């Protein structure tokens, strides 16, 4: 496959990666933040303002210790209220939770990067983030959108000296863009967040990150349940919802789990963190139960087959933005 060949060539030609400066290591020796990114997080994309605070508070009370936010979600103020309420209810302090947010495309100019971070911190009511991601390798302006990330990353590197962020990372990058970033900058990303689920497994890309010391967070780990992607199974080429997929259902019955728990357990077992979102208390608690869902070897074989049968990327704004994204990756 073309994308695998590309990854292999990058790995072989990457002396710059091994020489890149490390950020604060993910280890218990850093008491200023929790040891590492928790494998199960709570996502806030499409979390409606009307009950975002309540949902975040419920998530924290349920046991989630990893929250994923972003400026573009338009709900960080409500999420911040939920953080305050949830931590207050369970009697924990800020350092007990890993909180990620993201720089939006309209703040890619180097002199705007810290402004974007400051707005997010103000809205969330926080003094620092555990992780700040560049949401896309794309800048936007009145003239339109265009690929732009190196100068933005260099400005993000400087944020590490401010005490406002513990780690920095990227989201939605292609292998080529990662290669360019690591060749032209000093500090490698601590985390790369991108779309991963049983219908878009990206095994080779995930493995490349493991081999090169970059953690991976899977967004949309429940695939096409996000309302942004439309109704599952309605169009001719759309795979069925994971909640009714027959293969996932069979595994769920065998393991005493729900379909959602199977998908999330599969993601965590691959060494990625997953960030499901829900506005409903029962679903929030159900998803948290995925940490106790134990899959067997034959389950992974069955799920791998799903990735070949229903290969589908749901989040691809390439056409609407007029830029080329996900070059050399599956279903680009």
Image: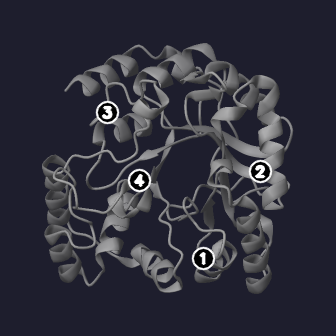
Q: Are marks 1 and 3 in contact (CB under 8 Å)?
A: no
Name the residue at 58% across, 66% down.
47
Give the total of numbered labels. Answer: 4
Find numbered disc 2 in the image and state the secondary structure of the residue it sits on.
Answer: helix
Q: Is tag 2's residue or tag 3's residue first in the polypeptide sequence? A: 2
| Among numbered discs 4 and 1, the one appearing first in the sequence | 1
Instruction: Check the picture and name the quadrant holding the N terminus.
Output: top left
Point out the frontmost of discs 2 and 1: 2
The disc label shown at residue 261, or none: none
Q: Earlier in the sequence, mark 1 or mark 3?
A: 1
CA–CA distance in space, label 2 to label 3: 30 Å
Sequence-first disc among 2 and 4: 2
Residue named by callout 4: 271
> For residue 59, which numbered disc appears in the image?
1
Tell which of 168 and 139 is nearer to you: 139
Task: Note whether 246 is above or below 235 in the view shown.
Answer: below
Cα distance in 3D space between marks 1 and 3: 33 Å
Cβ–Cβ below 8 Å for labels 4 and 1? no
Whole-percent x, y for residue 75 in the image? 68, 61
Side of 99 where 206 appears, left or right = left
Q: Is residue 226 visible?
A: yes
């Amino acid at each position: 496959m073309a994308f695998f060949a590309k990854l292999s060539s990058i790995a072989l030609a990457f002396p710059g990666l091994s020489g890149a400066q490390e950020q604060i290591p993910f280890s218990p020796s850093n008491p200023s933040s929790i040891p590492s990114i928790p494998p199960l997080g709570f996502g806030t994309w499409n979390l409606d303002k009307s009950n975002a605070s309540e949902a975040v508070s419920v998530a924290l009370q349920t046991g989630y210790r990893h929250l994923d936010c972003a400026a573009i979600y338009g709900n960080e103020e409500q999420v911040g209220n939920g953080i305050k309420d949830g931590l207050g209810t369970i009697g924990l302090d800020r350092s007990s939770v890993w909180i990620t947010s993201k720089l939006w495309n309209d703040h890619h100019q180097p002199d705007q990067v810290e402004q974007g971070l400051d707005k997010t911190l103000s809205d969330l009511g926080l003094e620092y983030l555990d992780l700040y991601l560049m949401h896309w390798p794309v800048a936007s302006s009145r003239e339109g959108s265009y690929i732009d990330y190196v100068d933005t990353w260099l400005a993000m590197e400087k944020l590490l000296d401010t005490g406002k962020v513990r780690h920095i990372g990227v989201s939605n990058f292609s292998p080529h863009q990662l290669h360019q970033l690591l060749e032209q900058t000093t500090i490698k990303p601590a985390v790369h967040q991108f779309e991963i689920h049983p219908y878009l497994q990206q095994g080779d890309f995930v493995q490349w990150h493991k081999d090169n010391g970059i953690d991976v967070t899977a967004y949309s780990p429940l695939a096409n349940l996000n309302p942004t992607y439309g109704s599952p199974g309605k169009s001719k080429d759309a795979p069925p919802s994971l909640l009714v997929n027959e293969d996932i259902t069979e595994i769920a019955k065998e393991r005493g789990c729900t379909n959602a728990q199977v998908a999330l357990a599969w993601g965590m077992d691959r060494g990625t963190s997953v960030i499901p979102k829900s506005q409903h208390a029962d679903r929030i608690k159900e998803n948290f139960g995925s940490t106790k869902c134990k899959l067997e070897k034959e389950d992974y074989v069955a799920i791998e087959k799903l990735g070949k049968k229903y290969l589908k990327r749901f989040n691809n704004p390439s056409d609407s933005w007029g830029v080329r994204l996900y070059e050399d990756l599956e279903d680009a």
